[in-house]
Structures are given as structure tokens and as C-alpha cells.
Image: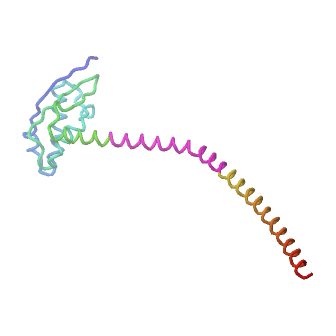
Amino acid sequence: MEKVEKIYTIPLRKEWLKAPKKKRAKKAIKAIREFIARHMKMYDKNLEKIKISEWVNKAIWCRGIKNPPPKITVKATKTDDKVLVDFVGLPKKFKQEESILRKKIEKELKRKEKEEKKKEEKKEKPEEKIEKKEQKIEEEKEKILHKEVLEGDKKLSKVQKRKEQIIHRKVLEK
């Protein structure tokens, strides 16, 4: 079936004035569904097949439940048995909100990318850490061996010094 798109300005005041104040926004949403079902020629009048976009819903509810807008301009797109209701053009307030949301989403994506990079670096780092640990162990072994060699030389020199001292004492005693 073909895709049918139509733009409508839906009068809501006439409908939501019939409802009590605490139910006006709900009545406005229901009025949009009924209007679209009538004008998009949905013969079964099944309101569940009409999907209202997030932005249209926000526009109705932005001023609270008691004071929905008196009229709204929407674009209805009918495919098969379903109808999607969107804004024709987003009002400034919603455009600003949308740009803020996009910025937040972009920041979130950048943050996730950075975290992924850090995870990749961490995956590489254990190999580097192992290499560094091996190098440190080798250096410590060399230091220990070098110290033992030096201490051995010192021990030999102490023994030689003692022998010399003993010889020196004997010479003095004579």
C-alpha cells in the first residue's frame, strides 16, 4: 500500500473544554486520535493503530494537564493500517530541547569512546606490566649479584687486613 502524508491543523479547544480541568491534556490526546482516524479514513476507527510522536505528546503536556494548547499542526503519515502523527515543524522551545538532547547524546557517545580506548589500553598494559616486572626482577637480580660480589671483595679485604694486623702485632712484639 502507498504511503499517504497529510498536514492538519487540529482544533483542540472545542474538545478539551468538554472535559474537567484535571483531564484536559488526556482529552486533547484522545481528540487528536479521533480527528486523525476520521480524516485519514480509518474505517475500523481503531485508535490503537494511531501512534503519536514524542514531540506532539510533549507539546500537549508541556503546559500541564489543565491547559493544553488550543490547536496544533501535525503531519499524519498512513502506511498500511498504521498512522504516525508528527509535528510539521518543531516550535523553538522543542528545537532547543532537541539540540540540547543531541549535545548530551554526543557527549555520552564521546565518553563511551574514551572508556573503550582506556579499556583497550588496559588490555595492552598487562603485557607491558609483565615485561616491566620481568625487567625489574632482572635488575634486582643483577643488583643482588653485584652486591654479593662487592661484599665478597670486602670480606676478602677484611681478612687480608686482619692478617696484616696480626703480622704487624707480631712484628711489634719482637
Instruction: Name the one closer to the observer, 49 or 146.
Output: 146
Instruction: Name the one closer to the observer, 48 or 160.
Output: 160
Residue at 78% over, 65% down = 154
| Image coordinates for residue 30, horizontal then vertical, percent | 18, 39
Residue at 22% over, 20% down = 4
Drawn side of residue 172 relative to residue 65, left or right: right
Residue at 25% over, 20% down = 3
| Image coordinates for residue 107, horizontal then vertical, percent | 33, 42
Query: Residue 129 lies in magenta, yes or no?
Result: yes
Instruction: Name the one closer to the observer, 146 or 169.
Output: 169
In the rendered image, the quadrant that contains the C terminus is bottom right
Per the picture, the main secondary structure of the magenta-coloured stretch is helix
Please give the range of residues in magenta. 106-135
| Image coordinates for residue 170, horizontal then vertical, percent | 90, 78
Q: In which quarter of the image is residue 59?
A: top left
Drawn side of residue 3 relative to residue 38, left or right: right
Query: Residue 126 lies in magenta, yes or no?
Result: yes
Instruction: Name the one closer to the observer, 94 or 99.
Output: 99
Residue at 18% over, 32% down = 87
In the displayed image of the protein, which residue is found farthest to the right? 174
Drawn side of residue 1 relative to residue 35, left or right: right
In the rendered image, the quadrant that contains the N terminus is top left
Q: In which quarter of the image is residue 99?
A: top left
Q: In this view, does 90 lie above or below 67?
A: above
| Image coordinates for residue 45, horizontal then vertical, percent | 22, 30
Q: Is residue 111 above or below residue 155?
A: above
